Image (cartoon, rainbow, N blue to C red):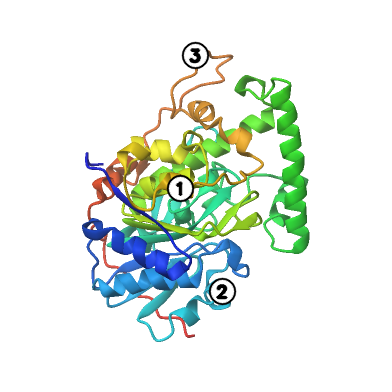
């Protein structure tokens, strides 16, 4: 991370494509170099059927227009959340790019070359996981996301968007759990799997469960029991998974190194995001070359306390970017004039405990007291093959260029 203030553009407009174009233009000389080949644009398709929860094709098309204009002769659009191939077709992305030079890359189906990345577990261990080499070796990765609340991280925007770069069978390890499941077993595991669906029943159940949790957490707060040392065992385990996800998002962003981030506030979501919350048209677009700074501005616009979003604080500490407004050069519209208080996820009261949980994973400051060896620090080096995670940050620290590792495979274009 350099000493200069990263530039972040905040543009409010009545029309989505105009806001995107103005935001990207406002970045001026802060734009990264755009290569003719190898640009990957990463949308967020959490649902392949519901556009409310996924990157809008108009936003994606407006970003692509700028990239073509700056010298790209072809763009790869890559995604791995849900059924990306179906989403590209169902949600209008392929129609938007009709006759444009584009390749469609479904990470879950098309990636055959994976590299190792170590991710932190809820028990403090480091587990080998698989990361898309196509994403990690691209000369320019552009994250195009939505501004949404999240069940674990409070906010999901440009940095959280990269999660589907992990192999689908290893993605649960981003949450700190072992690969091959959803982090739960028995009846609870079956319920969690069912809640990943998109039916009306799932939406209703999600809303009802959220309200019940809010009521319970409010009762804990009113009775003085909403404190780290008074949480139940299951609540502390959930907080450890929150902390694991925060630190693993930093590791992932170090490995992939996105150098342009665009977040759409026209398709925002609050409440029980990132799939089944309340749709909000906040009427703005945020763009910049520092993903930490971009997500910090987005969180502030949505009325969130950035201290409760661990991956922002940890990302700044790791040198990925700036996480304080006073350290960011904001151009365009003022943040204060656009700021709105959005409804947080029902888990928000627990999300504030990520620092205490991180300490139990061996990555944060050690707690003042230890009880029965409860807070034992794991002394393992975060290595990826023969290289450490810290070494992998070299290609993203200061947002410099990345060198492809080995020859990059060309993937056939999907017919549409």
Q: Specify the farthest residue to the front.
A: 337
359 or 322, nearer to the observer: 322
Residue 36 higher or lower than 152, as above or below = below
Neighbour class for label 1 at 10 Å: few (<14), some, many (≥20)? few
Work out whether mark 3 precedes mark 2 in sequence or the reverse, and give the earlier one.
Answer: 2
| Residue 302 percent coordinates (x, y) | 52, 46
Q: Is 404 placed left or right of 146 in the picture?
A: left
Label 3 element class:
loop
Residue plotted at (43% across, 80% down): 97
Of badges 3 and 1, nearer the viewer stands 1
Q: Residue at x 31, y 68 (%)?
A: 39
The CA span between labels 2 and 1 is: 32 Å
Q: Which residue is mark 2?
A: 91
Could you say whether the residue bearing mark 2 is in a helix, strand or loop? loop
Q: Which mark is residue 304?
A: none
The residue that mark 1 highlights is 337
Q: State the quadrant of the N terminus.
A: top left
From the viewer's perspective, tell me whether residue 308 is left or right of residue 313.
right
Residue 2 location, x and y as percent? 22, 41
- Residue 280 image offset from top left, x and y in percent: 59, 57
Q: Which mark is residue 368?
A: 3
The disc, 3 or 1, on the residue closer to the chain's N-terminal end is: 1
Tell me the CA gap for discs 3 and 1: 41 Å
Q: Nearer the viewer, mark 3 or mark 2?
A: 2
Q: Position of residue 413 (x, y in %)?
A: 41, 81
Mark 3 surroundings: few (<14), some (14-19) or many (≥20) residues within 10 A = few
- Residue appearing at x 27%, y 43% in the figure: 391
User: Which-is-in-front pick, marks 2 and 1?
Assistant: 1
User: What's the distance in space between the residues labelled 3 and 2, CA to CA?
Assistant: 51 Å
């Amino acid at each position: 991370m350099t000493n200069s203030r990263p530039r972040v553009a905040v543009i409010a407009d009545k029309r989505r494509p105009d806001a995107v174009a103005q935001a990207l233009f406002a970045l001026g000389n802060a734009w990264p170099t755009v290569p003719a080949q190898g640009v990957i644009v990463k949308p967020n398709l959490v649902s392949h059927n519901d556009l409310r929860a996924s990157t809008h094709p108009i936003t994606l098309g407006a970003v692509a227009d700028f990239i073509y204009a700056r010298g790209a002769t072809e763009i790869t659009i890559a995604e791995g959340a849900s059924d990306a191939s179906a989403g590209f077709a169902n949600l209008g992305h392929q129609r938007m790019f009709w006759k444009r030079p584009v390749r469609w890359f479904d990470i879950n189906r098309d990636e055959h070359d994976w590299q190792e990345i170590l991710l932190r577990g809820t028990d403090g261990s480091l587990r080998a996981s698989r990361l898309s080499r196509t994403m990690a070796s691209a000369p320019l990765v552009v994250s195009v996301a939505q501004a949404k609340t999240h069940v674990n991280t409070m906010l999901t925007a440009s940095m959280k968007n990269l999660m589907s770069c992990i192999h689908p069978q290893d993605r649960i390890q981003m949450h700190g759990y072992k690969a091959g499941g959803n982090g739960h077993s028995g009846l609870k595991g079956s319920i969690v799997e069912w809640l990943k669906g998109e039916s009306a029943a799932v939406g209703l159940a999600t809303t009802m469960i959220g309200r019940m949790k809010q009521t319970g957490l409010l009762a804990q707060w009113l009775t003085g029991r909403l404190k780290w040392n008074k949480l139940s065992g299951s609540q502390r385990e959930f907080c450890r998974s929150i902390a694991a996800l925060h630190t693993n998002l930093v590791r992932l962003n170090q490995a992939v190194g996105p150098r342009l981030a665009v977040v759409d506030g026209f398709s925002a979501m609050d409440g029980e995001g990132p799939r089944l919350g309340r749709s909000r048209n906040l009427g703005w677009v945020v763009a910049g070359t520092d993903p930490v700074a971009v997500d910090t501005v987005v969180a502030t616009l949505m009325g969130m306390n950035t201290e409760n979003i661990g991956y922002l604080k940890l990302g700044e500490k790791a040198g990925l970017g700036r996480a304080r407004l006073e350290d960011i050069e904001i151009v365009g519209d003022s943040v204060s004039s656009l700021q709105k208080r959005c409804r947080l996820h029902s888990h928000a009261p627990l999300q504030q405990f990520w620092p205490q949980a991180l300490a139990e994973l061996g990555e944060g400051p050690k707690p003042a007291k230890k009880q029965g060896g409860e807070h034992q620090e794991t002394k393992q080096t975060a290595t990826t093959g023969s290289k450490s995670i810290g070494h992998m940050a070299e290609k993203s620290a200061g947002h410099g260029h990345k060198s492809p590792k080995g020859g990059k495979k060309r993937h056939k274009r999907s017919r549409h």
